[in-house]
Image (tube, helix red, strand yellow):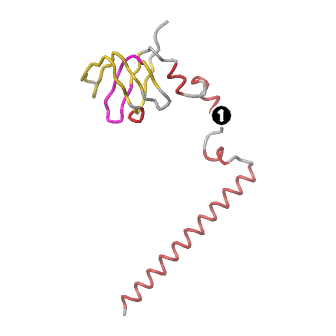
């Protein structure tokens, strides 16, 4: 008999927590709506940088990092993959998914040279970062 009352009590407690969660969620949504109306904020500008700020802070990239990378065609670049390997080579081609083809590429792991390649294709979703090295003029 006691186990039935404990089960009933915990069911009631669970329903009470769910009810409180939904109430808090509604309060938070109302608060955001009030901020939106009061400060005349756009939904995008409330959580991220405004497009105007982004365009000025990224003026070096000509509004898109991919354009900066396109300007590095035929230049030496370095790429680190998510698994820790690094490749250095001359950028031969790239696409909108950041897939890249390097020529005269050298593979490094923890600073140690592993292999040399004539040409190598690197899939964009494996890239952690890209270092662009500009040719001296």
Q: Residues within 10 Å of mark 1 (few under 14, many from 20)?
A: few
Q: Secondary structure at mark 1?
A: helix
Residue 137 position within the rendered picture, expressed as x and y whole percent measured from the top left: 49, 6
Q: Nearer the viewer, residue 76 or 45?
A: 76
Seen from the viewer's position, the closer of residues 6 and 87 is: 87
Q: Does the magenta run of residues contain 123? A: no
Left or right, 128 with respect to 32, comes to: left
Q: Magenta region: which residues?
A: 79-91
Give the prevailing secondary structure in the magenta stretch. Answer: strand
Side (left or right) of 108 relative to 10: left
Closest to the observer: 32 or 121? Answer: 121
Q: Nearer the viewer, residue 99 or 134?
A: 99
Please indicate whether residue 47 sits to the left or right of residue 77 in the image: right
Identity of the residue furthest to the top in this view = 137
Relative image position of residue 44 (x, y in whole percent): 64, 45
Q: Residue at x 44, y 14 (%)?
A: 74
Residue 80, percent across and down? 37, 29
Q: Residue at x 47, y 76 (%)?
A: 14
Q: To which quarter of the image does residue 31 belong?
A: bottom right
Work out whether 83 lies above or below 130: below
Residue drawn at (66%, 48%) of the image: 43
Q: Is residue 90 magenta?
A: yes
Residue linked to disc 1: 53
Residue 1 at what x, y percent from top left? 36, 93
Looking at this view, name the residue that lies furthest to the bottom.
Answer: 1
Total marks drawn? 1
* Residue 69, placed above or below residue 21: above
Query: Relative to 102, does residue 125 appear above or below in the rendering?
Result: below
Q: Residue at x 32, y 35 (%)?
A: 83
């Amino acid at each position: 008999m006691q186990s039935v009352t404990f089960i009933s009590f915990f069911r009631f407690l669970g329903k009470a927590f769910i009810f409180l969660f939904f109430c808090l969620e509604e309060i938070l949504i109302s608060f955001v709506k009030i901020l939106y109306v009061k400060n005349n904020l756009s939904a995008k500008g409330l959580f991220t940088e405004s497009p105007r700020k982004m365009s000025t802070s990224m003026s070096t990239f000509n509004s898109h990092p991919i354009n900066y990378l396109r300007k590095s065609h035929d230049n030496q670049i370095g790429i680190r993959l998510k698994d820790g390997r690094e490749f250095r080579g001359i950028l031969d081609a790239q696409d909108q998914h950041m897939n890249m083809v390097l020529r005269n590429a050298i593979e490094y792991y923890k600073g140690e040279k592993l292999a040399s390649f004539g040409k190598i294709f690197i899939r964009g979703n494996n890239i952690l970062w890209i270092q662009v090295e500009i040719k001296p003029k």
